[in-house]
Structures are given as C-alpha cells and as structure tokens.
Amino acid sequence: MAGARKLELAGARKLELSEALALGPAWRHTCYALLYAPDPGTLFGRIPLRYAILVRRGRCRSLPPRPCFLAGVFLWGVPANTRFLLPQMQMRFDGRLGFPGGFVDNLDRTLEDGLNRGLLEQLGEAVADFRVERADYRSSHAGSKPNVVAHFYAKRLTLEQLLAVEIGATNARAHGLEVLGLVRVPLYTLRDGIGGLPIFLENSFIGAARQQLLEALEELGLLEFDAVSALKNPAHKQRQPSVNSHNVR
C-alpha cells in the first residue's frame, strides 16, 4: 500500500462524495474501515475504557490494474451509557495501523456493495448481521501522487455485534494474510499525559487513517473537541509513558 501512504504525504485534500465519484478513470478509490463499540469496562478498576477501536495489521494486495474503489467503514456500537464506546482498527502486514475495507471493482453495483464484500472477506461471517449503507458515509480524501481517493464510513453496531466480529475475525479468509489482527484503540490518557491515546497516536498509520480516526472521535462525540485538538499534532516523540502504579490512578 505504498500508494496509500503517499496519499497522506502528498497533501491529501477533502472532497465531497459526488466530487470524488466524478473523477476520471485515471483515479483509484481507496478507504479504510474503523470498527468501534461501547465498552463499560475499566482499566485496573480505575480508568474507564469508554470505547474499543480495532486496528488492522494486514497484508495488502497491490492495487488492481484497472480503476477501482477500496471502501472502508468505521463500525461502532452504542450502549445505554454513551460515555463508553469501543472503537476498533486493524494492524496491517507492513506494521501500519488502518481500517478494514475492500476494493470495489466493476462487478459491484455500488461503493457499499464492494465495501460490505470486503468486510466479509477480512472480518468473517459476523458482518453478515449488518450492512453498511450510503447513510453511513463520513468523508473522502484525495491525493495526487498517486491518484487515489479514500472513502470513509461509520457504522453503528450493538456491543454484541461488535464482539461477534472480534471473535469471528480469526476465521476470516484474509486473516493472517491481508489482516494480521484487530487492535483496540485506548480512548483514555494516563496521569503522565502520554500513556493511552497520545502514545497510541505515535504509531504509523496508513494514508489518512490517523486523521479519519481523530475526525470520527470528534464528530461522533466520542471525545470532546479540546481533547481531539490537542492530539492532532504528535508531541511525544522522545518521551515514554511511565510504568509505575501511580500512572493509572
């Protein structure tokens, strides 16, 4: 997915979906999928987990020779107490974090058809319990080197649906190939101000995945605006989180 990485470095710009779909045949369309759901649990009995986000570690196919879409979705579940959500991403084969999704080729009638097919391949049969629709669309980003457009979705799930996806993902056809595993994103910050989400964001993300994650956390009300703004620019490259017990109190 070197091309998708270039999308981030070459100055990706945001597009309306209609504008993105009107681009010519020289453009390829890609996207990543983020899954999240409510999590009422606590870390060490003290820190609310809020949401779990899974990240993909996956082995990526080379881009197809013909124009195509790679659609992605942000899946999330809603509890009675909406303070607690469980967002998910995937870890890719190249060590970068991203979202599940799939190419939409000429055999798919719509962008969403290709997306749902890709989710089934990467995450297994549990995704057959729901369907990502056009109403779940969030954003599109485009870069000129190469000509790639990334589409992003957010899908609301129940906690039970999301847990079923986690359990069944290891039996998916792409597990161990395109997808090396699902990872939950920590939506808390430890007392040292580094551990938790801040240090998680120091990882390498594919394409616009980091930006899409932060935008989704803010726009869906999972984190407050001030908290998201403080996280948009990496600031802890030389520091490491504390491992002492006082850091979690």
Image (cartoon, rainbow, N blue to C red):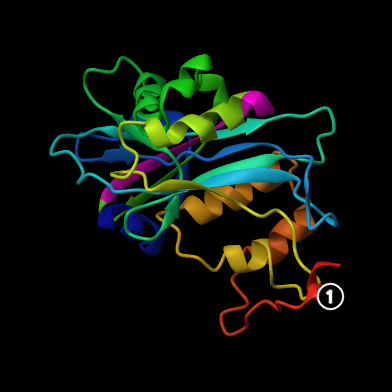
Which residue occupies the foreground of this view, 161 or 74? Answer: 161
Q: Which residue is mark 1?
A: 246
Three-letter amino acid code at the position of disc 1:
His
Instruction: From this view, report whether residue 30 is shown above or below residue 95.
Output: above
Instruction: From this view, report whether residue 186 is shown above or below residue 127.
Output: below
Query: Percent from the top left, x then y, of residue 205?
Result: 45, 58
Query: Percent from the top left, x then y, of residue 152?
Result: 48, 37
- Range of residues picked out in magenta: 147-160
Residue visible at 45% across and 64% down?
204
Residue 77 located left or right of residue 190: left
Q: Is residue 96 magenta?
A: no
Query: Percent from the top left, x then y, of residue 132?
Result: 50, 22
- How many residues crowd mark 1 within 10 Å: few (<14), some (14–19), many (20+)? few
Query: Percent from the top left, x then y, of residue 119?
Result: 41, 29
Instruction: From this view, report whether residue 188 is shown above or below residue 219.
Output: below
Inspect this view and state whether residue 216 appears.
no
Question: Is the stretch drawn in magenta largely helix, strand or loop?
Answer: strand
Residue visible at 86% across and 67% down?
249
